[in-house]
Image: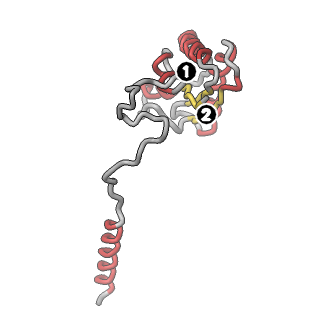
Amino acid sequence: MTIRKTTAMIAAITMLAVGACSKKAPETLPPAPAGTDAGSDSGIGNAVIPGSQQDFIANVSSDRIYFDFDQYNVDAEDQATLRSQAEWLQRNPNVRVTLEGHADERGTRDYNLALGERRANAAKNYLASLGIDPSRIQVISYGKERPAELGSNEAAWAKNRRAVTVVIGQ
């Protein structure tokens, strides 16, 4: 057998072996985690659990605020959004949240991580000024690593310069 034929046989066997190992979708899905709505009628229909992320989204004006290029100041529109969030947090005093800071793709990774943190802290400080206990608010920055909108244009960048409030539990 020549080297060329041996190499071709090894390649064919490898492709067959890899193809045979590919995962197939299960016929039935595992049950949903406890405390979640798996879509079945459990007597409460599609009721939103008080204090959950779904409750938060349903009852605040928005879960996010947006920033201008290279800025982290909370403007009047952001203040209105954060007042809405603060009212919800006051009605749910046991809920804790994480404020996620984000930046657009321009700038270095380190610079955008720092900018995202300043944005999240600006939102946290405003919520604290409205009477929300700062110990209920964690801050994390993702910089440019988790864009909300893909694209290299002003419309995409504007949606990526944000701070997002996420309910993490009670």
Left or right: 15, with 121 as reference point: left
Mark 1 and mark 2 lie on one chain; the one further toward the N terminus is 1
x and y percentages locating residue 142 in the rendered image: 57, 36
The residue where tag 2 is placed is: 141
Q: As drawn, which residue projects farthest toward the front?
A: 43
Q: Nearer the viewer, mark 1 or mark 2?
A: 2
Q: As drawn, which residue projects farthest toward the bottom?
A: 1
Kindly check if marks 1 and 2 are in contact, taking CB atoms under 8 A apart as contact.
no
The image quadrant that residue 114 belongs to is top right
x 64%, y 20%: residue: 93
The residue where tag 1 is placed is: 67
- Look at the image and tell me whether residue 3 can be seen: yes
x 34%, y 78%: residue: 10
x and y percentages locating residue 118 in the rendered image: 65, 26
Closer to us: 11 or 13:
13
- Give amino acid for label 1: Phe
The image quadrant that residue 17 belongs to is bottom left
**Residue 164 vertical placement versus 12 (above, below):** above
**Residue 31 vertical placement versus 134 (above, below):** below
